[in-house]
Image (spheres, helix red, strand yellow):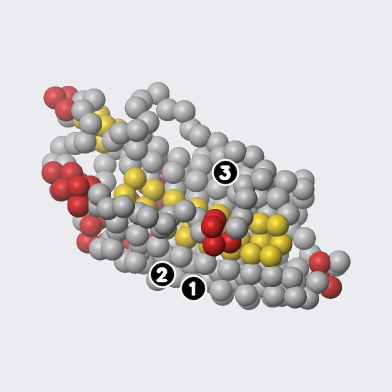
Amino acid sequence: DALGRLDFLSHLLISGNKLTAIPKSLPNQLEIFDLRCNLVQTLTKYDFLGLQKLQVLLLSKNRITVVEDGAFGQLIALEVLDLSYNPIKSLSRTSFMGPRKLKEIYLVSLKELIPTQEPFSFPAPESAHLEILNMESSPILATQLMEDVAALTMFHELFDLNLNHCRLSTLRSDLPRYLPRLHRLELTGNRLNCTNIVWLVKWLQALNISMQDTGKFRREIYNLKDICCKEATDAESFDEMTVICASPAYLSGKQI
């Protein structure tokens, strides 16, 4: 309740405080909420009520296992969302419904996700303005995206797609059609079936454009320091800096 009396507070940075739940009575004027490296386990549809001016929500490195549908429904101004490095068990196709201005989503290393048999199950946001989607080391999400045409149609403004270390063996050949504005595709650490791969080679060559400041999580803009813990890195048994063919046999081990 003490936070609720700080009516004009716009930045709340409370990383590494061992909090087990989202604080109550958050100021309605909040624009940036940094809750990284805490012990939060559940996100409910009541946690962010009234935060209609919130632009940046950082929740990485908590212990979140449950994200209720509607948890982000009130966040109509949200532009940046980070749920990376959490043991989340499931995300539904409606998990990110509500925010229509999302530009960056970080879903790195969500390794506890349980596969679903439902078609079109990727948790696509409602926003048509998404520029950055980082799913490094989140193989379930990457597979869902490749199988979900409805989700792909939402990403026509996507600029940066990170699928590093997602255990992908194939990519759909119509991907360039769904991602016409893509300037960067990251596939490091995947072992691909390189049969009929010419389209991908040409596309990767065409995407070899400098990102400059794009994809830097806007840290300079928001002046956020990662004060809690260093980003975890995933050690892989194969070359981590290249995209490698796993098949057919005559191309096995070759770098794309």
Which image quadrant is residue 186 in?
top left
> Given the image, on which type of amino acid does mark 2 rest?
His
Q: Does residue 218 sit above or below 102 in this rendering?
A: above
> Given the image, on which type of amino acid does mark 3 rest?
Tyr
Residue lying at the far right in this picture: please name it: 2
Badge 2: residue crowd in 10 Å (few <14, some 14–19, many ≥20): some
> Given the image, on which type of amino acid does mark 1 rest?
Arg
Badge 1: residue crowd in 10 Å (few <14, some 14–19, many ≥20): some
Image mark for residue 85: 3
Residue at mark 2: 129
The x and y percentages for residue 219 are 54, 56
Mark 2 or mark 3, earlier in chain: 3
- Quadrant (top left, top right, bottom left, bottom right) of the N terminus: bottom right
User: Is residue 139 shown left or right of residue 182?
Assistant: right
- Quadrant (top left, top right, bottom left, bottom right) of the C terminus: top left
Residue at mark 1: 100
Mark 3 or mark 1, earlier in chain: 3
Which image quadrant is residue 67 in?
bottom right
Disc 3/disc 1 C-alpha distance (Å)? 24 Å
Circles 2 and 1: CB distance less than 8 Å? yes
Disc 2/disc 1 C-alpha distance (Å)? 8 Å
Q: Residue at image x 19%, y 47%?
A: 205
